Image (cartoon, rainbow, N blue to C red):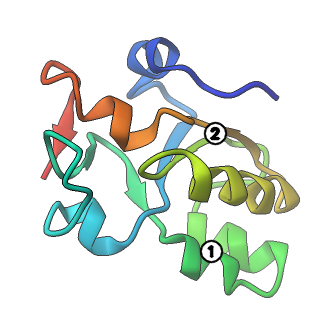
Amino acid sequence: MEDVTLDELRRRLGEDGLVVLDVRTAQEFEGSAGASCDPRQGHIAGAKNLPIEVLCASRSAAEVRALVGVPEGTEVVAYCHSGSRSRFAVQVLRGAGYEARNYPGSWHEWSRDPLLPSAP
């Protein structure tokens, strides 16, 4: 499956059946911590936070699905700060039966456009 581009995610954000998963820390997600190179802190509006450390501590596909909270087969787009943690998360998510894709631009790219929806 191909990576998700900024343009595709912008168009599809809020679409039924699409889950956007932020795999950064809770502090990065909330905007209380983050990379100084980003003009904004926070997360993509509508995203769910599931830190990569929690995801990787799962012992089974069923446990991953319980954490993500949507049925197997759902399309999940994972992102982080720069696409590295989310690329790893995609492999875990696919192993649990999700149609997972990586957004490699991640928050580093998204935060640069003040018109893109975000939340603190």
How far apart are the two marked residues, 1 and 2, measured between alpha carbons? Answer: 15 Å
Name the image quarter holding residue 33: bottom left
Q: Is residue 15 above or below residue 67?
A: above
Front-most of residues 78 and 19: 78
What's under tag 2, amino acid-wise? Asn
Name the image quarter holding residue 96: bottom right
Residue depicted at 28% across the width and 61% down the height = 29
Assign a secondary structure to mark 2: strand
Q: Is residue 83 above or below residue 23?
A: above
Residue depicted at 56% across the width and 81% down the height = 54
Q: Which residue is mark 2?
A: 102
Q: Give the mark, 1 or 2, whose residue is nearer the N terminus.
A: 1
Q: Specify few, some or many for label 2: CA neighbours under 10 Å numbering under 14, 14-19, or 20 or more.
A: many
Question: x and y percent of residue 64 in the render?
Answer: 70, 72
Question: x and y percent of residue 77 in the render?
Answer: 58, 40
Q: Which residue is mark 1?
A: 55
Question: x and y percent of residue 95 in the render?
Answer: 87, 60
